[in-house]
Amino acid sequence: MKQNSFTIKLTDEQQKKLIALLRSSSYSPVEVPHTQIAVDAGACRINLYHSGKCLVQGKGAEEWITFTLEPAVLGEARLGYEAVHDPESVQPHMGIDESGKGDFFGPLVIASVYTDAKTVEILKELGARDSKKISSDRVALQLASEIRKKLDGKFAIVTIGPEAYNRMYAEIGNVNRLLAWGHARAIENLLEKVPDCPRALSDKFGPTSRIERALMKKGKKIKMDQRTKAESDPAVAAASILARAGFLNALRKMEKDFSIETVPKGCSAKVKEIAKELVAHKGPGILLKTCKCHFRTTDEVLEANGYSRSDLPAFG
């Protein structure tokens, strides 16, 4: 699955060059909200947003970037030169990411993926990228399946289901501490398969020491890095896809287990509607089995059915 969507942040000077380029007669203007300019180049579309981000999409996106954007606007080659711009990305390491943190329904899923230079090339060929940039659940599940086949078992997935999540949150009282615990377990589990992995990278969600404290004997030896927008790293991007697939599959299982036609993601009005129906038919205890109950949504759902948090069963 070749990657056909790229987002590149441009400087003010690069934006000016791109606008001048796209105003030439070889491009057809199109209307796209929040853009400075948007055009159809035939094999791809180019959108330059007010934020300075340039989005290039279509089967000819990679070719247009390589032969037009890089020489005429960027002044340097980037595609295919990831090892030059970010040498650590192709060196042996693992990436960790999660899915479900902001969703009322379903588990918190954390995945870890080990990569080296060879694996990075494979992931690039598959089109692995941050799962948040994949709008289709079907595509995310398909890509996750392809990635798992290519990783030769060098990945780990930790799923904290709603009941375990609610019990742990009651004890820990902090989402990021719970997330750090899950990251540490994903690291430890992957080190069972790749004991000589030297480094772990995740998106920054709190002090790095928080994950380090949660690591056990094997994990104490690994170098732990966190950074913003870590999903640009191939290992983290692959982990984000596996985590999202694990979360989506858990929602599908929940649909069967609790006879729900569709379990919605996020924390929308539809989510509240489904939760209210569940409580109306199965009582307040159903929330502990299906939802993350520290969300304020819990109070709204309970109150709509004449209950309060005191009506939730205690953890035994």
Image (spheres, rainbow, N blue to C red):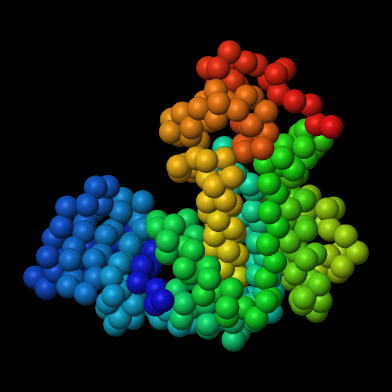
At x 57% / y 40%, what residue is drawn? 258
Q: Position of residue 114 (x, y in %)?
A: 67, 74
Residue 101 left/right relative to 82: right
Between residues 92 and 8, which one lies in front from this camera angle?
Answer: 92
Q: Residue furthest right?
A: 217
At x 79% / y 26%, what residue is drawn? 314
Q: Position of residue 189 (x, y in %)?
A: 78, 66
63 over 24 or under it: above or below: below
Residue 132 left/right relative to 104: left
Between residues 143 and 134, which one lies in front from this camera angle?
Answer: 143
Q: Position of residue 297 (x, y in %)?
A: 56, 27
Quarter of the image with the C terminus is top right
Between residues 253 and 248, which one lies in front from this camera angle?
Answer: 253
Residue 86 shows in the view: no
At x 13% / y 60%, what residue is drawn? 29
Quarter of the image for residue 43 reads bottom left
Quarter of the image for residue 42 reads bottom left
Quarter of the image with the N terminus is bottom left
Quarter of the image for residue 68 reads bottom left
Q: Position of residue 102 (x, y in %)?
A: 56, 42
Residue 100 shows in the view: yes
At x 44% / y 57%, what residue is drawn? 137
